[in-house]
Amino acid sequence: MTTWPDTGATVAARQQFAATLTAGRSNEWSDAFSSIPRHVFVPRFYRQNQEGAWEPVAWAEPGYLKAVYNDEALTTQLDENGIPTSSSSQPSVMLAMLEALDARDGHNAFELGTGTGYNAALLSHRLGDNQVTSVDVDPHLVAAAARHLQAVGFHPTVHAGDGAEGYPGNAPYDRIIATVGLHMIPPRLLDQAAIGAVIIAPLGYGLVRATVTGPGHATGWFLPTPAYFMARRTGPAPPQLDAARKQAPTDTSVPPADLLGRLKFPASVALPGFTSCSWHDNDGELEAAGLWTADGSTAIAHTSGAVRQIGPRRLWDTIEDLAKIFGEEPARDDFLLTITPTRQTVTYADIDGPSWALPTTP
Ligand SMILES: C[S@@+](CC[C@H](N)C(=O)[O-])C[C@H]1O[C@@H](n2cnc3c(N)ncnc32)[C@H](O)[C@@H]1O
């Protein structure tokens, strides 16, 4: 079993961190944040240096303790291409999600995305570890999380598999929390939710809080909090950037900066799971933005007003439609999610506002 010292410096750092994090807010979670040692769950993280290369920072190395007990998301795993595949989420976002979850004594909770196990530990502290089930797609992460949970005295159910399948053996769940970006609420999770269950999930670049109103039915508004969670791992198609560059350009009046700024959240609802990138000149000025979706549709918009698109969908046309609706960045909490057994829809502002259908499968 891995154990890490938890005396003096770590205790003081954690208590200061918990006090700052929860200051002026409901202290329902302050006890959990000041009790659970994040450093046990994040013995090492990766940080980008000035050249953009990832460098590990481990226990006892300079900057480690300060970062672990700070309001920072910490990258904890990289794939062979240096793309982050797991992280310990930003504590203030975790707190906002836990508060919105409204977990009460006796509730049975499911987490999609175990990662380090830190959030599962916070939930176990609040509800009791026999009321917590957490699933991650990566068996190595699950094994490490189980070890670290055990080291702090918790034994919730942790399972390796696709979290979109839930974990029927421990259902029904009163509270469901996803800590990985989703395109829709997975139907199998809805099947395993009790009537009245609350679901908190990152959908696009927002966080939705939906209440289950009947079998296969749920509804709820987005929270005002922005969310930038890594996407659920499913293996999307790579972007067709080279092929897009060879297309004949059309004109657009929507600057690429709008995709990266005011339209980012609505675009994530209208084009679930889209990925974007940007190109800058030597002075750091934005030159162009690219975006693509899992079906291989790709668009590149240049600051000159030229757009090149390829694939089954013309993604920039959707961005232009959004630009007509949203003169400025809309508030996330003006968006409503409605789920029926056959359809998941996000509506803006009220039930007569524009709406977007989410994909029908996770
Ligand atoms: C932001 S991290 C979760 C942070 C975690 N809750 C914690 O406290 O450390 C997202 C996690 O989702 C996991 N993940 C990605 N796709 C998944 C899937 N299909 N099913 C379950 N977990 C998945 C990743 O392996 C990663 O560990």
Image: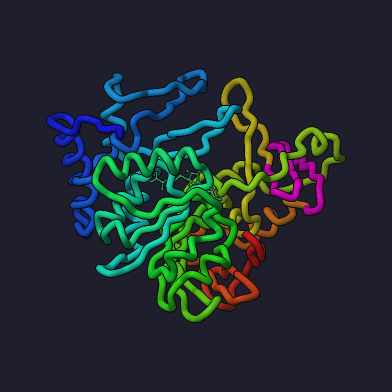
82 magenta-colored: no
Residue 323 can be seen, yes or no:
no
| Colour scheme shown | rainbow
Front residue of this view, candidates 35 and 222: 35
> Residue drawn at (51%, 22%), measured in percent from left and top?
52
Left or right relative to 253: residue 308: right
Residue 98 can be seen, yes or no:
yes
Residue 58, image x and y in percent? 34, 24
Front residue of this view, candidates 88 and 141: 141
Q: Residue furthest bottom?
A: 214
Q: Residue furthest left?
A: 8
Query: Disc count in the image?
Result: 0
Q: Quadrant of residue 320?
A: bottom right
> Residue drawn at (79%, 33%), measured in percent from left and top?
242
Front residue of this view, candidates 244 and 136: 136
> Residue drawn at (42%, 54%), measured in percent from left and top?
134
Residue 319, image x and y in percent? 67, 53
Quarter of the figure that contains the C terminus: bottom right
Residue 67, above or below 325: above
Quarter of the figure that contains the N terminus: top left
> Residue drawn at (59%, 78%), measured in percent from left and top?
352
Q: Quadrant of residue 267?
A: bottom right
Front residue of this view, candidates 34 and 289: 34
Q: Which residues make up the magenta segment?
A: 291-313
Residue 115, image x and y in percent? 43, 43
Residue 234, image x and y in percent? 63, 48
